[in-house]
Amino acid sequence: EALRSKQVDLGEDHPELASTYHHIGNCLSDQGNVDDAIVHFEEAIRLKELDPDGGAERDADVLTIEGILHNLEGNQEQGLECYEKSLQILVTKVPHRKEKVASLLHLIGCVYLMSGEQKKAMKLFEESLQARRKVLGFVHLDVASTLFNMAFLHQTRNRLDRALKCLEEALKIRQLRLPDSEKVAVTHEKIGSLARAIGKTKKAQIAFEEALRIRKLIHGEQHEAVATVLQELGDLMDDLGEYDSAMSYYIDSLDIRRNRLGLDDIAVAETLYSMGYTLHNNDEAERALVCFEESLSIRRYQLGEDSKEVGDTLNMMGFLKAKRGELDDALTLLWDALRIRKLQEDHVKVSETLKNIGNVHREKQEQELAVECYEECLRIRRAELGPDHEKVADALIAMGNVQSDMQRTDDAMRSYQEALKIRTLVFGEHDESVASVLQYMGTMEF
């Protein structure tokens, strides 16, 4: 509307229209409408260049927009070069435009973030945050954008508490300036995911429920974005052991995804897999297998026979078949899962499947084969996770169990003792997991 009004007053080719085209381009880019964003940025450049009196600030603005265009087109090096030239012009020739300097620091930080140079990105975001707060105030939306990006960086460096703090600061600003908006919903979702990761389940639930409310308000009840939040709430309820609630959220998510995306969409497979996992946790193996089988069919069709998602599904199906006593079927599924996980070079998941195969061999009284699987599982876990990881202890207990079956009492006791040492170190001497190892060791004394 502002653009139309200015065009009536000033004509189609007035340089003052450039900033409006620039703002519209930013909005379109945020919405993922890259092609239309590029058109508006190119028009902004054309109009800027028509300004005979723009001087150094005009040159800096043109370079900034050219940098944005390069980045939208995937040319990060050229984008970075434009930003740095623009910054140099502003600092040396237009130093009073501090808000533009702050914006460029943020944009350069984004380039480093995308290229994986986290240390450089964080330094630039911190400088940008300080400058933006000084020039724009503490409750400006640009301040929130920088905080949001800093949260992502903290998360990738496993500084989850710092990431959560940045997101909560960004949320306060966005709620104040853009209540019930898409960006507020996104921030709530990110807070929910982080809070879940660090065990703050109540905070996670509140954040997801608020994201769900806003998503429904913006998009309606049957939108894919609503289904995504329902999926996240289902995952959280599964963590909490509230399996009926988890299934309720998953069923709602599945209905939306099937209706909006189609029966064979990969998001449908994700929800079916989650449903299978929850049903497995709730000791409903038969229903779980039905969900896993449907998820497997979609994943094979969409992602190929050797995708990691197919490997994950086969592993769970093999595990469930073994629990039901269908040992030969279990081995077939688990060996296929192992083949895929080795192809994907996901060593920790390889160790998980090896342990499952070892368990099946133990059930079949094939102890030597079980020992081979457990030994390889232990080797991988020690190499990948370190000698004192809880998963190493789990494998040692499995090894101790089969050694006990084979009457190798001394070997079994050594395995249990090492597992006890690790679990005591990780969980403390009064933890239930420590007591379970002591029980195994006590049984050996009879």
Image (spheres, grey):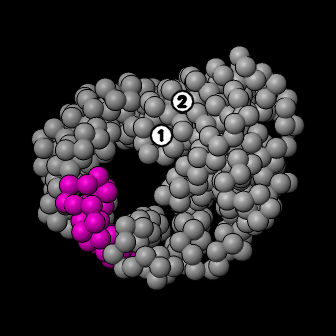
Residue type, numbered disc 2: Cys
Q: Position of residue 253 (x, y in %)?
A: 52, 74
Element marked by disc 1:
helix
Is residue 24 part of the magenta span, yes or no?
Answer: no
- Mark 1 neighbour class, 10 Å CA radius: few under 14, some 14 to 19, many 20 or more: some
Q: Is 307 left or right of 60, judged from the image as shown?
A: left
Earlier residue among tags 1 and 2: 1
Residue 305 in sight here: yes
The residue tagged 2 is 82
> Over which residues does the magenta segment extend?
285-313
Q: Quadrant of the C terminus?
A: top left
Please name the residue that numbered disc 1 is placed on. 70
Residue 117 vs 10, above or below: the answer is above
Q: Residue 23: x, y in percent?
A: 69, 51
Asked if labels 2 and 1 touch by Cβ distance under 8 angstroms, the answer is yes
In the rendered image, residue 287 lying in the magenta stretch gets the answer yes
Residue at (77%, 57%) from the top-left corner? 10
Question: Dot 2: what SS?
Answer: helix
Asked whether the viewer can see residue 206, the reply is no
Kind of residue at disc 1:
His
**In the visual, does 319 lie left or right of 13?**
left
Q: Main secondary structure of the magenta part?
A: helix
Please give the name of the residue rendered at 82% of the width and 24% of the height, measured from the top-left corner: 96
Image position of 64 with respect to 221: above or below: above
* Front one among 45 and 343: 45
Q: Nearer the viewer, residue 76 or 226?
A: 76
Q: Position of residue 79 (x, y in %)?
A: 50, 34
- Which one is nearer the viewer's eye here, 57 or 326? 57
